[in-house]
């Protein structure tokens, strides 16, 4: 794989975006001469969808870094929306109020930081989005169709400004970027996902009951996959990868192989990349 890794060239250093620009300016590119077949400045969107606990965020971030692409964590946007709900004391079931809060808050990333920081209502909320009180309400906030409309529009604006992107979520390949060049769906058994979560918590000194975590994961899967707007589905043209028996590095290797082989196959068919 090593000779095909360099999807970007170092002749175009990152160009930080202005924080007020929702997408920011495209950060990476490359000269045609050094670019492998199947990857040009026209853009390359790689979508990674799947349920919680499959290791999506970390492997998506690592894959983006390996391939020299930007990385978009769309779950962070729904979590930032949930911070607003919590701070305003809104009921997550009050769809009109939550939608109005999100529409007025300009949820976006500051691309000048690494990793890009998530902002809501002008404030950085990155340090709060993984908290338990946010995790407890985010599925309900993410199920609100009008919230999704606003954030999906924002995600497309980000991709327009960062056309070489690995984007991770639940609906990226199915709804947000149906024409993405490469679509991946990560899965793992609920038990394995619960065990991974328990191990993460143990690292933070928190003891957790695996059976309880498994039940919580099943509850979130159910909410995410049965909602009317942007439900969690495996797109028909996605490559499904079961991460249950794979280490994080093995998953990243596999995803890299999938991306590169799709690019080569597309180039062989004469598709613009
Ligand atoms: O991936 P995560 O755990 O940070 O996602 C948080 C929540 O947001 C989770 O309930 C699923 C939801 N989500 C979504 O509905 N659509 C996305 N594109 C990303 C996340």
Image: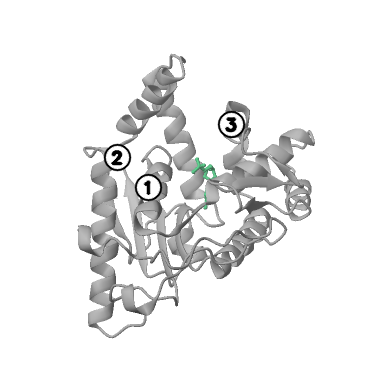
| Residue topped by disc 1 | 62
| Helix, strand or loop status at disc 2 | helix
How far from the left and from the top, in percent, is residue 273?
Answer: 37, 77
Please state which of the two labelled residues, at mark 1 or mark 2, is closer to the viewer: 1
Q: For residue 262, say whether it is visible.
A: yes
Which residue of the protein is positioned furthest toward the bottom in this rendering?
Answer: 270
Whether the residue carrying mark 2 lies under 8 Å from ligand 1 is answered with no
- Position of residue 163 measured from the top left corner of the image (x, y, whole percent): 49, 68
Task: Tell me the tag on residue 110.
Answer: none
The residue tagged 2 is: 248
Q: Which residue is under mark 3?
A: 136
Circles 1 and 2: CB atoms closer than 8 Å: yes
Q: Position of residue 197 (x, y in %)?
A: 40, 28
Q: Position of residue 116 (x, y in %)?
A: 57, 48
Asked if disc 1 is less than 8 Å from ligand 1, the answer is no
Q: Distance from label 3 to label 2 (Cα)?
A: 26 Å
Measure the alpha-carbon separation of dots 1 and 2: 9 Å
């Amino acid at each position: 794989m090593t000779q095909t890794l360099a999807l970007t060239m170092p002749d175009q250093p990152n160009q930080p975006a202005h924080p007020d620009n929702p997408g920011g300016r495209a950060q990476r590119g490359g000269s045609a001469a050094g670019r492998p077949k199947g990857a040009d400045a026209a853009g390359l969107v790689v979508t990674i969808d799947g349920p919680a606990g499959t290791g999506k965020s970390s492997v998506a971030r690592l894959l983006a870094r390996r391939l020299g692409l930007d990385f978009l964590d769309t779950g962070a946007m729904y979590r930032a929306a949930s911070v607003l709900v919590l701070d305003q004391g809104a009921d997550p079931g009050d769809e009109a109020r939550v939608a109005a809060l999100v529409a007025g808050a300009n949820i976006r990333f500051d691309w000048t930081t690494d990793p890009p920081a998530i902002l809501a209502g002008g404030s950085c909320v990155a340090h709060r989005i993984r908290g338990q009180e946010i995790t407890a309400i985010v599925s309900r906030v993410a199920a609100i169709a009008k919230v999704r409309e606003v954030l999906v529009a924002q995600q497309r604006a980000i991709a327009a400004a960062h056309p070489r992107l690995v984007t991770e979520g639940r609906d990226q390949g199915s709804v947000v970027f149906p024409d993405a060049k490469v679509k991946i769906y990560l899965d793992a058994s609920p038990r394995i996902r619960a065990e991974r979560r328990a191990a993460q918590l143990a690292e933070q000194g928190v003891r957790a009951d695996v059976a309880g975590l498994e039940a919580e994961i099943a509850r979130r899967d159910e909410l995410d996959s049965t909602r009317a707007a942007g439900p969690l589905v495996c797109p028909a043209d996605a490559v499904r990868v079961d991460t249950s028996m794979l280490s994080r590095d093995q998953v990243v290797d596999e995803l890299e192989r999938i991306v590169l082989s799709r690019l080569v196959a597309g180039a062989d068919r004469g598709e613009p990349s």
